[in-house]
């Protein structure tokens, strides 16, 4: 099995345990007028953007069930920068930042509008660093492959905030905490990455349903335990969590988006996990919602 075939498989064809209890929960979710939910979503393969599978079905159900946002702000693992930037154009382009996939995936356009006013408001909220108003980026696959299932009409403004790759976890956590007021203004904030993400250790010969290496299971359990207990300091210092941490997170690009979501937890929020599964031994789709 080659890499391209594998990446297509992880986009679909994996049968997960039923998500009905989660669906029932989010259908009963009520917006109290004070804050929007916050999501961390394991986005996985770009093929999830066009396939009808357990992951995309859950994203679609989320879009129908949580309060309709006035705008969506995504912190994607695929926009790494020097410094912090926010998309500030009226019409962000759809970025196809991948290769080796079917033409159908490259043909996708997600024409959601931007919102320069919200970009400026977000910039003003962040006082710990300068935020550049960006007019060149757009919506990369860490964003549109998820959001197009949640809001298929593309009628809700979508913005992206970049990740300064040269800064530590504490920087990202403190920056994200300054965005809390956006939750009170109807903005849905999504961190989009993967908790466990090691493409170099993919088990090409073990593409069984929900297969994960022992170390991936250990790390996934540790992550969920720390998230559930609100131990954000331990999660920021992930290298010290377990000897397998560097296997789960060989580079932090897909982990940093989770740090943004963690920082936005309100003391009244409950946490709910979903899409909690393993792919190819060394990847997880585990996601969570604060509400």
Image: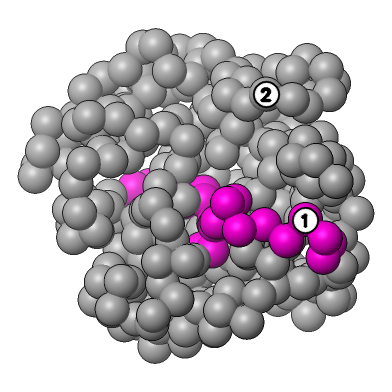
Element type where label 1 sits in the image? loop
Please name the residue that numbered disc 1 is placed on.
Answer: 204
Mark 2 crowd level (few <14, some 14–19, many ≥20, 10 Å Cα): few
Task: For marks 2 and 1, give the CA distance.
Answer: 19 Å
Front-most of residues 112 and 222: 222
The answer to if 206 sits in the magenta stretch is yes
Residue 82 appears anywhere in the view:
yes
Residue at x 84% of width, y 24% of height: 102
Rendered position, 281 above or below 97: below
Residue 86 location, quadrant: top left
* Mark 2 or mark 1, whichever is nearer to me: 1
Q: Give the range drawn in magenta.
A: 181-207
- Who comes first in sequence, dot 2 or dot 1? 2
Q: Give me the disc on residue 99.
A: 2
Residue at x 46% of width, y 51% of height: 254
**Would residue 10 appear left or right of 160 to someone viewing this image?**
right
Whole-percent x, y for residue 118 in the image: 34, 29
Residue at x 58% of width, y 24% of height: 97
**Would residue 67 appear left or right of 264 to someone viewing this image?**
right
Residue 128 location, quadrant: top left
Front-most of residues 149 and 6: 6
Element type where label 2 sits in the image? loop
Asked if the residue at tag 1 contacts the one at tag 2, i.e. Cβ–Cβ closer than 8 Å, the answer is: no
Residue at x 28% of width, y 40% of height: 165
Whole-percent x, y for residue 7 in the image: 75, 43
Residue 276 location, quadrant: bottom right
């Amino acid at each position: 099995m080659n890499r391209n075939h594998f990446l297509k498989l992880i986009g679909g064809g994996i049968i997960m345990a039923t998500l009905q209890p989660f669906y029932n929960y989010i259908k009963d979710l009520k917006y109290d007028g004070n804050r929007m939910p916050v999501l961390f979503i394991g986005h996985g393969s770009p093929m999830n953007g066009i396939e009808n599978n357990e992951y995309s079905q859950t994203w679609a159900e989320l879009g129908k069930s949580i309060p309709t946002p006035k705008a969506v702000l995504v912190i994607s693992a695929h926009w790494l920068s020097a410094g912090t930037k926010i998309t500030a154009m009226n019409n962000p382009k759809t970025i196809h930042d991948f290769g080796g996939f079917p033409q159908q995936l490259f043909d996708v356009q997600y024409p959601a509008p931007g919102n320069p006013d919200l970009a400026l408001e977000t910039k003003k909220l962040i006082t710990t660093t300068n935020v550049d108003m960006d007019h060149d980026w757009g919506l990369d696959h860490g964003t549109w492959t998820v959001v197009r299932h949640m809001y298929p009409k593309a009628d809700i403004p979508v913005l992206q905030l970049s990740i300064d790759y040269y800064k530590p976890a504490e920087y990202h956590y403190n920056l994200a905490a300054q965005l809390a007021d956006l939750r009170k203004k109807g903005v849905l904030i999504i961190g989009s990455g993967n908790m466990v993400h090691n493409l170099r250790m993919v088990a090409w010969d073990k593409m069984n349903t929900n297969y994960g290496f022992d170390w991936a299971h250990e790390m996934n359990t540790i992550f969920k335990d720390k998230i559930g207990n609100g131990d954000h300091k331990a999660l920021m210092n992930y290298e010290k969590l377990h000897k397998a941490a560097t296997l789960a997170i060989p580079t932090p690009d897909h982990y940093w988006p989770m740090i943004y979501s963690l920082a936005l937890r309100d003391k009244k929020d409950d946490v709910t996990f979903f899409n909690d599964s393993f792919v190819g031994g060394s990847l997880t789709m585990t996601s969570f919602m604060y509400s």
